[in-house]
Amino acid sequence: MHRRLLLLIFSLFLPSILQAHNLPIGAPLPKVGVADKGELLYQNNEFSYKFWNSAQLKGKIYLIQHMAASASASEMNAAMVETAKKANLPQKYYQMTTIVNADDALFGSSVYSRNWLENNKKMSPVSQFILDTHGDVRQAWGLQAKTSAIVVLDARGRVRYVKEGALTLKEVQRVINLLHRLIPGGAN
């Protein structure tokens, strides 16, 4: 009886163990493009989208939040996003990028996701927002579905930090410290 229970528990958790991301520290991001929707632009009080490619993530320090298009995923790392905003990192060297995986959205919630992106773009026009309707980024980077991930890139586009799931307050502070160290003139 106990053996069957252990086997059942193991088989339920095995898929999540095997689906580890493929973003090794020190390596460049796997390249991926988002053609359907892509980067959200807001100019002259109008929204539009353009093709986005991860190869563009060079030349600045990037804090990337990749998340499922759900309220729970949005809230998962809200403390990280708010702390980064309060850190007042110089825009010349730093960029916040949020990638929303609409492929992970509940049926009928795509309008909510688009409205959420548009409202956030209005409130934070310097931030970059990507709408990934087919989950191409999640697949290319090997991220888990239905969750949130935080990735930090250095100016050469190399991964310096990655975590899937909610960050603890200690991990949030670790990311902020890393961002400050990566900024030119920061504490290296």
Image (spheres, grey):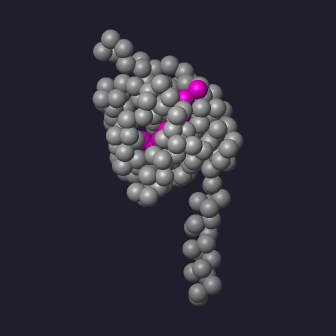
Residue at image coords 59%, 87%: 2
Residue reaching furthest right? 27
Residue 101 seen anywhere in this rendered image of the structure: no
Residue reaching furthest bottom? 1
Give the percent coordinates (x, y) of residue 148: 47, 48
Range of magenta residues = 59-69
Residue reaching furthest top? 44
Residue 12 seen anywhere in this rendered image of the structure: yes
Give the percent coordinates (x, y) of residue 22: 66, 47
Give the percent coordinates (x, y) of residue 171: 47, 55
Q: Is residue 71 above or below residue 7?
A: above
Q: Quadrant of the N terminus?
A: bottom right
In depth, the one of 181 and 6 nearer the eye is 181
Residue at image coords 30%, 29%: 123
In depth, the one of 78 and 112 nearer the eye is 78
Secondary structure of the magenta portion, mostly? strand
Q: Quadrant of the C terminus?
A: top right
| Residue 20 falls inside the magenta stretch | no
In depth, the one of 177 and 81 nearer the eye is 177
Q: Is residue 84 above or below residue 133?
A: below
Q: Quadrant of residue 5?
A: bottom right
In depth, the one of 86 and 107 nearer the eye is 86
Residue at image coords 67%, 48%: 24
